[in-house]
Image (cartoon, rainbow, N blue to C red):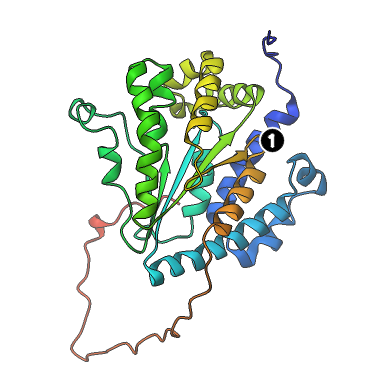
Amino acid sequence: MNKPLSQKVSQDQIKEEYLDAYDEELELELDDGLIDHLLDGFSDQESKDSGLDRRLYFKELFRLQGELVKLQDWVVAKGLKIVVIFEGRDAAGKGGAIKRITQRLNPRVCRVAALPAPSIRERSQWYFQRYVSHLPAAGEMVLFDRSWYNRAGVEKVMGFCTDAEVEEFYRSVPEFEKMLVRSGIILIKYWFSITDEQQHLRFSMRIKDPLKQWKLSPMDLESRRLWEAYTRAKEAMLERTHIEEAPWWIVEAVDKKRARLNCINHLLSQVPYSEIEHESVTLPTRIYHDDYARNPIPASMYIPSKY
């Protein structure tokens, strides 16, 4: 019988969560050329405390994001269609990984599909119907932040569907995914795996952080109580939907930074690509007219210069 989790959270664990939040802001703002200079402000001890050396993390993240840009160009040039599914428990780090993948990419090429709960009309449709409209056309990548596997997870555990509907899902999904692959779609499926203790920590941190409390829905809190039911559902899902045409890949996600780097690195390995040569870009000469003059804008239209 499993023992209840300790309610004590170490100072190192709390520090790691906060450091990761700060690192996220740095990732959004830093230019690759500035990384070494700006990271001089972090001590060696701080780098060690984060589990993965932060210099290595940032350098590898920027390098991998550069490769993602090359992959994006290849997808467009070759007309590829890629679907990447991200599944895992609440707070497993799926959103953070997706954010790092899309951060430097063209949203017209790489987009995220994060569907809300189905409407009454959608619940009466063929189960896969609402997902089909989000599948990629040629030259597109779609990242599903949760997917049709909701039926095998949250819908099953929370009682939103019947046992017969779950069984029909298990019969249908392998054929559905084989059909997608036969149609030319590259389908890649990731499960982000965290421990009971790590989810407890991340939920606790979200409760205490007013900027992240919105991430905790009543459904998330209920999923915490039903950890074991979700485990049984996950095990059944992996066993019955791990097919040769679209296998599951497990991402060890207790360490967020390693999980992101490992996931991006693996994703790049799943699609053979080469760098696409682009014509050099030349800025055109600006046209000037002697009779051109900008009309003045009333001062009342400007926002206050508070900063």
On screen, residue 270 above or below 229: below
- The total number of labels drawn is 1
Q: Amino acid at mark 1?
A: Glu
Residue sitting at x 51%, y 14%: 226
Of residue 9 and residue 160, the one placed in the foreground of this image is: 160
Q: Secondary structure at mark 1?
A: helix
Q: Is residue 174 visible?
A: yes
Q: Label 1: which residue?
A: 16
Residue 247 coordinates in the image, percent (x, y) = 52, 43
Q: Residue furthest right?
A: 45
Which one is in front, 108 or 71?
A: 71
* Residue 147 visible at all: no
Residue 17 location (% of width, % of height): 64, 34
Quarter containing the N terminus: top right
Residue 272: x percent and y percent?
53, 65
Question: Which residue sits at x=73%, y=41%?
Answer: 50
Give the residue displayed 70% in from the left and 9% down from the top: 3
205 lies left or right of 241: right
**Nearer to me, 155 or 97:** 155
